Image (cartoon, grey):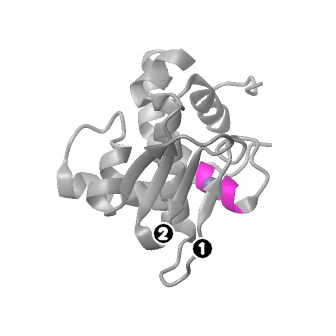
Amino acid sequence: MPGPVTDARAYELRERYHAAFGGAELPVPVEAIAEDLEGLRIEQGHEDGLSGMLIPDRRLIWLNGDDVPERRRFTIAHELGHWICQYREGTLKLFYCRPGDVAAAADRAAEREANVFAAELLMPEPAVRAAWTKEPEIAACADRCAVSTEAMHWRLYNLGLVEERPA
Ligand SMILES: [Zn+2]
């Protein structure tokens, strides 16, 4: 069974951004949402076994610069998920995300919640449905949203638009 596919907080975040800054709907401007709307900084580094990190009290998202751009976009959205859904002012908790956490098979509830949020943020359901209707190709829809074909395949599967479960 597909997991939960909706997170209203991702819609709300996107709407707040577009109300303040305007701009095109796709690809979702995830860096600007983090930096200009939420006041977070984004830094890149190199660390084996680490995709991203959220250091809330420094308002910092750390990314692995070795990852491809689509992957880094998903990681930013994932860290925004921790920031919006889980971080509470005053806690000093640090979110440390391995590649397996920023993936469909994540086993920890907090990581799964961040991934649902990220998918929702980067691949708005109405826009994905419209793109799929226009051109029912996973790669074409992935290009529209600037996400990996794997992330788009999961999104389409969870929305019931493709029957084949991603490998
Ligand atoms: Zn995480």
Q: Is residue 159 above or below residue 7?
A: above
The quadrant in which residue 154 appears is top right
Residue 95 inside the magenta-drawn segment = no
Residue span colored magenta: 110-116
Whole-percent x and y of residue 74? 51, 41
Q: Is mark 2 within 8 Å of ligand 1?
A: no
In this image, 115 relative to 27: left or right? right
**Residue bearing the label numbered 2:** 56
In this image, 106 relative to 76: left or right? right
Amino acid type of the residue tagged 2 in the rendering: Pro
Whole-percent x and y of residue 8? 49, 60
Amino acid type of the residue tagged 1 in the rendering: Lys
**Residue bearing the label numbered 1:** 93
Whole-percent x and y of residue 140? 47, 16
Q: Is label 2 in contact with label 1 (beta carbons under 8 Å)? A: yes
SS class of the residue under badge 1? loop
Q: CA distance from mark 2 to mark 1?
A: 7 Å
| Residue drawn where x is 61% and y is 49% of the image | 115
